[in-house]
Amino acid sequence: MNCHASHIQSWDADAVTGSSGHLTIDLAALQRNYRKLSAAVAPASAAAVVKADAYGLGAEQVSKALHAQGCRHFFVAHLPEALKLRPLLPNDTHIFVLNGLQPGAEITCTNADVVPVLNSLEQFRRWSFTAEKLGRVFPAVLQFDTGMSRLGVPPQERTALAAELKGCGNLEILFIMSHVACADEADKKQNADQLAEMRVIAAEFAGLDVCFANSGGVFLGGDYHGVLARPGIALYGGAPTAGRYNPMEPVVRLEVAVIQTRTVPAGTRVGYGGAHVTSAKTRLATIAAGYADGLPRSLSDCGAVFYDGVRLPIVGRVSMDSITVDITALPEGTLSLGSLVEVLGPHQTLEDVAEAAGTISYEILTSLGRRYERRYR
Ligand SMILES: *Cc1c(COP(=O)(O)O)cnc(C)c1O
């Protein structure tokens, strides 16, 4: 009886509450990243891109922490994201919807004090028409396509738009913007091409402020900054420029609990499909996160987790709710039920996991599962 009681007490408290993964989000590091990006673009200012629930970290907590640092411009992708965020932020903030103005969303947008990024002449006309009907002046942002062919006013609509804007008294254009397709690849010629195109547009729409740089763009130099930068990934600790030193501080830490350990002889199959066969006597630990928790199945037999700085390779296929790792490198008895191993942290960056999985840090972050216990520091 005593023996059982002492075992229960030695467990991590979270094993008792049932949580098997801890996602720690360091809001102070996020704030330092924001200050660093603000300093890099000064005298321009820095907005925050908080789409997809702030890249999976929690749009509410992230936006409030950034507002406390002076951030007043927040970008989301979808209108429902903006509607959710609006009541959480003071009235001195602008919330912009990058994906544009959907037909029928005009009244919802204006009632919620959300600013649509107008991506076409048609969206411009509908927003202006609604403002006129209500006898109001609506704020708006115009996005132009400078070479990504994704979103924004296409080149062939610019002349008509410039003409209509001249006679339009019911829209206040806060700034014009565009998005750079290869900003994380500092040497790509397309960056300069897009910048040149943006300068042509700025001349056509003279007198309007420019918003241009994402995270990568911030580090392409002052030419790319305009008056407002729009970093996302760099705020969250991701590398702004591929393959270069990452000047940002990590914000996310992910630790996952061990839920079973075993020792198996050589020739033992591990996981779905029996895809992995041990080549020697091996100690294994199964941890409580899988592809449903955002650890891609492409990490099967190639990714790793860490404990105390020791690399523990993933063996066999990633399951939906668990992963099995080889813990032979650790002294026997080091890991037991409830021990936490590091998935993201000081020994393994977002970029490390992304590279092992064959993807980018953005996809790792935005896939982080909903089943982890989130802790904000
Ligand atoms: C997502 C997005 C950003 C932020 O990009 P990062 O590379 O994460 O800094 C900026 N602008 C637009 C239009 C976006 O879609």
Image (cartoon, helix red, strand yellow):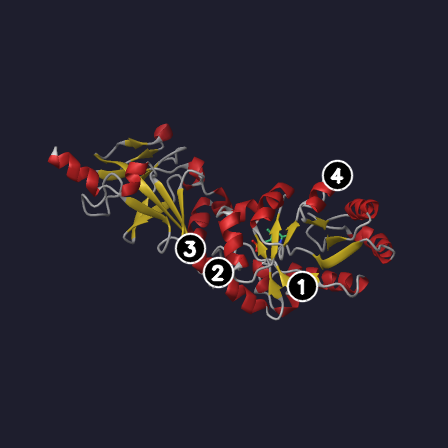
* Pointers 2 and 1 in contact (C-beta within 8 Å): no
Task: Say which mark, if any, is on residue 192.
Answer: 1
- Which amino acid does the dot numbered 4 rest on? Pro
Q: Are marks 2 and 3 in contact (CB under 8 Å)?
A: no
Ligand 1 is within 8 Å of the C-beta of the residue at disc 2: no
Pointer 2 residue:
31
As helix, strand or loop, the secondary structure at mark 3 comes to loop
Whether the residues at callouts 3 and 1 have beta carbons within 8 Å, the answer is: no
The tag earlier along the polypeptide, 4 or 3, is: 3
Residue at (40%, 41%) from the top-left corner?
372
From the viewer's perspective, is residue 350 above or below residue 279? below
Q: Amino acid at mark 1?
A: Ala
Q: Which mark is residue 26?
A: 3
Spatial CA distance of label 4 from label 2 is 36 Å
Residue at point 72%, 59% (across, down):
175
Q: Is residue 366 left or right of residue 259?
A: right
Amino acid type, label 2: Gln
| Closer to us: 264 or 374 | 374
- Mark 3 vs mark 1: give the one in front: 3
The span from disc 3 to disc 1 (Cα, nearest Å) is 35 Å
